[in-house]
Image (spheres, grey):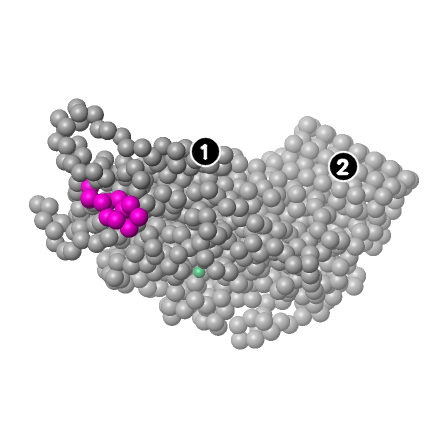
Amino acid sequence: MKLRRSTVIALSALLAATVAPVALPSSALADPAAATAAAEPNQVTGLTVTQADGYATLAWTPVPGATDYQIERTPVDAAGVPTDVARIVGVWRPNRQVNNESPTFADAGFNPGDRFQWRVRARVGTAEQPYSAPVAGTTRAPWGDPAVPGQNLRTQWETTRAAQYTSDVEEYAYTKAIDDLSDRVRVVEIGRTVLGRPINMFVIGYPAPPATPAAVAATSPVAVNCNVHGNEPGDREACLIMARQLAFGTDARTIDLLKKTTVLIVPTINGDGRAANTRGNSTGQDLNRDYSLIRQPETAAYVKMVRDYRPVAGYDGHEYGNAQAGDLPMLPPRHQNVSQGIFDESLDMIEGHMYEEGAKDGWWACPYGCQNGSGVGLSEETILRNTLGLKNVVNSLLELRSSGGQTRPDETNTANNRRRKTFSALWTFNQFLDYHHAQLGDIKKARAEAIEFQAGNTGRLVFRGSRVIPLHPAPHPGEAGPREDLPTPDMILENAPCAYKLTEEQYRGARTDGPGGVGATVAERIAAHGWKVVKVADGYIVPLAQPERGLIPLLLDAQGAEELVAGERVYPTVTGRHNGPLTISGFACFSGATVNGPVTVRPGATLVATGTTFSGPINAANAAGVFFGDSTLRGPLQISGTNGPVSIIGTQVSGPVNVANNAGGGAPYLVGNTINGPVNCSGNSPAPINLEVRNTVSGPKSGQCAAL
Ligand SMILES: [Zn+2]
């Protein structure tokens, strides 16, 4: 559902004005259940309990004037006799969900399959009102029919009734069993940890996952990163259960989801940290402060996976211990270099979809950092949430409540506390899949616009600094939102360069910032991010006219808060108007220029153009690199024999386009262009790609470009 802030405000206002007692119709007394439910003043009525995977949703009729509600759970046997003490397991407050007039609470701290009785009572101020009539129910057993192969698999965490988390060895066995038994699953090792543990990824599709990363990319995949901090294991257990549901579920929802997209699940990126129960990896590095710098093999593996599989949406699972700060904090990418559309769509995923669905199912998703949540959720590009946003991926952080809070008290039962957090993650990740399924058109639109915006942008660069997360009337408590985190003046560069130039030593020189004092070279890390680089006579040029323009300067500019290397800023060489033929040798950067006349790019030369209009043919033969972003080309475009990168993004071309025999710069980009004329591609190695952003071509498309 799309976020409708005005509607939420109106409902909140309406609620405040309509808290008047409602008399029950006398006919209700004929119904025995309703008769018991209406016995006392201020007694909660209409309690229902609906079972789901790992949680039960309680709903009831609001009591006029109630301040909040307490939810009580009692274990009972088949005859309804209590087998243990009753506990208050939740407190529901009206400002914690949208749909304030329809209280719901997801109770999640119990062993799935056991039987319980629930009651709810209102409090007026601190005065407790009478409990509702009890409702008993048997909770849903762990997912999967014990008699069906595959469905009957269980994690170590499930078989030990949450007494143990699933070990590395048990994870590998469970993962292999799913891989062996399900045609929908391929398990891929995307890398190894510092200590050599495999980093596996489930690739799940229906009836089978696409065969190659590029084929997966064509399905607009989603990616869930389950365990970056080794001492935050709750999300990982949820991911392992969800992988089983997706691999063996026969319900229509699961089949529909997997027909439409491919689900990528990385259960344990930080296997060494998980085995040692430490936040960082075996070197002590916090991996969620390393996704831009990729000093560690674990983060490098994930970034290469994003480069190759090109997920359009993501979630990153964590746990937190703040007793306040909401029950299920989420947060979009906030860095100010993230495109507005990616920020907006990510925020809509949370405040539109998760808030709305959370209110139906009983979960309270508050923005991370809300309600005295301290200085968390900021703009570091080293955090996956921001890195992915800067890679044009709609995404969110998820934090699970690892300790008790005001509205979900500590049950003083370790297993139950673990279940509470793990099943809140299972709910969130499944909702994430449903959001992707429902909103894929909007997600793809935001991504396409972001790629075109970044490749054509010449505006200011922000090295550190966040967008503000505005207060939402509900479920935001209203005391405080996430910290503002605006950029300081030294973190802003108004006059952005066209490119960065690196020396041979900077590009290929030895690095000491990896495990054991050995780091990957800058060249290897740039390749892992997937950026295009031009080899020139005296070094290497990284143009900003690329899809990850928001991230490149954070690593290559000396002003970056955590830069990788201090590259030389290369400023535009051609602006304003130029009349007559142009021959380019060396490096030329056109920015906001107008060129009337033919352009020839000589062998070994480089052309970079953003926001520039060319009237006349452009011919680049045996160039070192050719980049167009957000430009207008009135005339034929011929690019052949380039010994380096070719990139044409968000550009209008009137006339035939021919891209032939280019090699050495990765796949040429033909992304989101509008071309009035025929397009032919031939002999390029590798073949051109469109990053799943189609070109609009009025003439025939032929050769390697036929499907772009
Ligand atoms: Zn974490």
Q: Residue at x 65, y 32 (%)?
A: 696
Bounds of the magenta segment:
121-132
Q: Is residue 6 magenta?
A: no
Q: Is residue 210 left or right of residue 34?
A: right
Indicate which disc, 1 or 2, sits on the residue closer to the N terminus: 1
Q: Nearer the viewer, residue 648 or 668?
A: 648
Judge left or right: residue 181 versus residue 542: left
Give the residue pinned by disc 2: 632
Q: Is residue 569 visible?
A: yes
- At label 2, the amino acid type is Thr
Q: Nearer the viewer, mark 1 or mark 2?
A: 1
* Picture quadrant of residue 136: top left
Q: Quadrant of ligand 1?
A: bottom left
Other-residue count near label 2 (Cα within 10 Å), few / some / many at <14 / 14–19 / ≥20 = many
Residue 170 quadrant: bottom left
Residue at (48% x, 71% y) in the render: 284
Residue count near mark 1 (Cα–Cα under 10 Å), binned few <14, some 14–19, many ≥20: few
Residue under the image location 64 percent in, 48 percent down: 547
Task: Find residue 501 and report its horizontal and vertical position in percent.
Answer: 74, 60
Visible residue check, residue 4: no
**Image quadrant in which you'd find residue 16:** top left
Q: Which residue is mark 1?
A: 10
Q: Which mark is residue 359?
A: none
Residue 613 at x, y percent in the picture: 80, 38
Residue 195 in percent (x, y) is at: 44, 70
Give the residue displayed 28% in from the left and 38% down from the top. Answer: 63
Where the C terminus falls, by quadrant? top right
Q: Relative to 20, does residue 349 appear above or below in the rendering?
A: below
CA distance separating discs 1 and 2: 46 Å
